[in-house]
Image: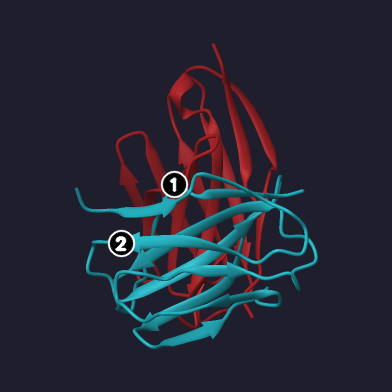
Amino acid sequence: DGGITQSPKYLFRKEGQNVTLSCEQNLNHDAMYWYRQDPGQGLRLIYYSQIVNDFQKGDIAEGYSVSREKKESFPLTVTSAQKNPTAFYLCASSSQGRYNEQFFGPGTRLTVL
Amino acid sequence: GENVEQHPSTLSVQEGDSAVIKCTYSDSASNYFPWYKQELGKGPQLIIDIRSNVGEKKDQRIAVTLNKTAKHFSLHITETQPEDSAVYFCAAFSDYKLSFGAGTTVTVRA
């Protein structure tokens, strides 16, 4: 099956710990994205990558870091510098082009205790 | 950057009636406008999209209209069914990024 996988589905961490969320795609897409979703709000862009070994900050990058060493993978690290990390995190991917149809993974719900 | 506003935030309709969700955007350079449906605890799913060179697009019971002059676009769902209950997001694409509206929670009453 082609698609985007995120793991784990639920993640619990203690305050002050860094945590890495996994995102893998087998759609052969060049671009990948990380969004944060809070209750009653839309999706806010954290980081995006249009090509391997390159990525850009989105609207709310502070306290997060990413890497893009492989086309299929775009892990997100939530660092202890993120003031309010509890949220639903969504990864997406798209092929390059003028019109950017994005496909989303199932999400990871992070709870910081 | 792009700013997308979406209304209403909640919408309750009787089964069989129509539902309309409206969005406005700020960046005249935006050229692609997708709509996503999100069920509880899941990732958003693309349901329909429209490009900037098209004014209207229809796919069975859903349709989207775009007015580039006024910078607004709308989602229309006809003959609503219980499985249409979900959160719907509009988005606008510019500068290699999608900007999303805050979402509309649609409830279809049986």
Vertical arrangement, residue A55 with respect to residue B15, above or below: below
Label of residue A25 in the image: 2
| Amino acid type, mark 1 | Pro
Neighbour tally class for label 1: few under 14, some 14-19, many 20 plus, Cα within 10 Å: many
Q: Colour of chain B?
A: red
Vertical arrangement, residue B8 with respect to residue B1, above or below: above
Can residue A13 be seen here? The reply is yes
**Who's the residue at 45% across and 61% down the image?**
A22
| Label 1 sits on residue | A106
The location of residue B17, given as percent across then percent down, is 51, 22
**Who's the residue at 45% across and 51% down the image?**
A7
Quarter assignment of residue A39:
top right
Q: Secondary structure at mark 1?
A: loop
Q: Residue furthest left?
A: A1
Tell me if label 2 and label 1 are in contact, CB under 8 Å. no
**Who's the residue at 47% across and 47% down the image?**
B43
Can residue B70 be seen here? The reply is no
Q: Which one is in front, A51 or A5?
A: A5
Question: Mark 2 — on which chain does it sit?
Answer: A
Question: Mark 1 — on which chain does it sit?
Answer: A
Identify by letter the chain in cyan: A
